[in-house]
Amino acid sequence: MRGLWLAGRAQLLAGLLPLRRDQVGADVLAGLTLAVLGIPEALGYARIAGMPVVTGLYTMLAPMVVFAVLGASRHLVVGADSATAAILAAALGGLAAAGSPRYVELAGLVALLTGVLLLLARAARLGFLAAFLSRTVLVGFLTGVGIAVGLAQLPDLLGVHVGSGATLPRALEAVRALGRAAPGSLAVSVGMLALVLVLRRLAPRLPAILLAVLAAILASRALDLPGRGVDVLGAVPTGLPGLRMPVFGFADAGVLLGTAVSMVVVILAQSAATARAYAVRYREPFTDGSDLVGLGAANLAAAVTGAFVVNGSPTKTQIVDGAGGRSQLAMLTTAVAVLVSVLWLTGPLGALPNAALAAVVLLIAAELVDVRQLRRILAVRRDEFAVAGLTAAAVVALGVSTGLVAAAVASIIDHLRHSYRPRNSVLVKSSAGHWQAAPVVAGARTEGGLAVYRFGTSLYYANAARLQEDVTELLAGGVPLRWLVLDGAAIGDVDYSAAAVLAQVVATCEQRGVQFATCSLLPPVRSQLDRYGIGASQRPCFQTAGEALEAYRAESSSGHGPG
């Protein structure tokens, strides 16, 4: 763990220092902006997670401060997140009643396990695992989360009570109960949604959700909505969260370990993608896993302060960046503003109607459905759109945790599908003398009896048969093949099974009197082929396709074989 300690020490205050004096005002203003916009959203995230609403504010206290001190990114904002909140609710729903002390205790244990796993991932340099959720699958996953979270709000939006269970059955039950919807709750939810949408349209710079929440609280008090049958939050605790280590039981930890692993995968993918994007924008250094110490410590802070799992938030990061924030000073400012709210301003929240909070959650959920990105994927890659759609459907139908597993599996299958059917080609010279790719068909030749055959990806057990099929096709017709040159520019690795197939190809060429050679091999691949007994020490190996072509021409004119 010494490496982990050194990594944490090296990046201490890296997101904050150096602090530019001319930037302090903009950072403070950006932090206040995030507090204004983030507080009502934090309440919504707590509701998604099944936690007491005040714990949403707790996620913007200690976790945010800890990440500001230990995180490597100057821009990434850490806080409650809809995806991880939905995973938490799905995992704990069958173990304890939402919002109960037992539920809060289990949520703290999940945050503790997640924090430990993130620190272990940093120590083991597992930041590369973020790549196992492709952007396409991540879009589909978040879309599914948005739909599932939105459907889960129907009972409160309508003011009807339904049984517990999976998202789809509860949503269908709420729809069937539409005839007995509570008029007051329905009016509040419709009014909230209409007010936010109108404000966003007419005055996009105003904090629409915050203003709508304040309007709902004022209306609740002025019109005595609780007396008219509208459910409200009730008393919200005032004061700082107490420091308490979650009770660690091996039985509970075993049950929740899979949930924590799911959290880590989402956090790795989402946080790394967000931090990388802003590092590139501002030309700052970035390496996979550089923020894991801060993220792990932030989740440990959440675990001991009564909060729940936190994640790097793309939306919060964009809010701060759009407001001019350029360092973690903005996050420290946000934490101070939330601290003031927790100490003195939670009283009025008790009058907030549940329908109003459900409307806030619905708006958050809608933002997760990235219609523009889905349309773009559909326009350029219909097969990947199908993968995104299946991922979203799995999340809605099977649940968030199972949907996450489906998302990871879909990413891997999508990758294997592409590598299984690589874009192989025969290299030919254009009329201008430039190399270009031609289809692999019977009789395809680079020149005369020469075929420079490029395999489009690494060779491994699943796609090695394609190599054999292509070589059989090249031998099938046309000008008799005298030289077959394997261009390995795209080959990064050759596994043992593929090497055996390649050896069979070489043997087939020799039986047909065809000279087998290689070109454009990366040094590690060249060494691999030497170990397999089919490399440069046994057969010709050229630096480039052009060098192979010149050697073929020289051999053709002299009648001697290549050297």
Image: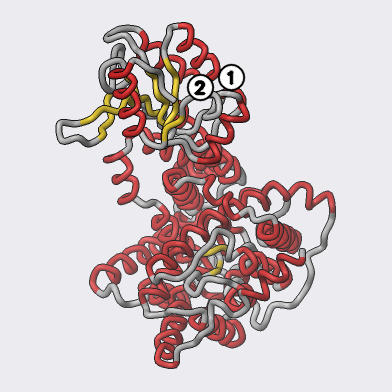
Task: Name which of mark 1 and mark 2 comes first in the sequence.
Answer: 2
Tell me the tag on residue 153. Answer: none
Q: Nearer the viewer, residue 91 or 218?
A: 91
Quarter assignment of residue 444: top left
Is residue 329 toward the left or the right of residue 374 in the image?
right
Alpha-carbon span between mark 1 and mark 2: 9 Å
Instruction: Residue at 56%, 29% (x, y): give it.
Output: 529
Residue type, label 2: Ala
Question: Can residue 5 be seen?
Answer: yes
In percent of width and height, residue 136 lies at 42, 44
Q: Nearer the viewer, residue 485 or 188?
A: 485
Quarter assignment of residue 62: bottom right
Q: Which residue is mark 2?
A: 464
**Secondary structure beneath disc 1?**
helix
Q: Which residue is mark 1?
A: 500
Residue located farthest toward the bottom when viewing the structure as drawn: 21
**Secondary structure beneath disc 2?**
helix
Q: Nearer the viewer, residue 159 or 398?
A: 398
In percent of width and height, residue 54 lies at 61, 72
Residue type, label 1: Ala
- Give yes or no for contact between labels 1 and 2 (Cβ–Cβ under 8 Å): yes
Closest to the camera, between mark 1 and mark 2, is 1
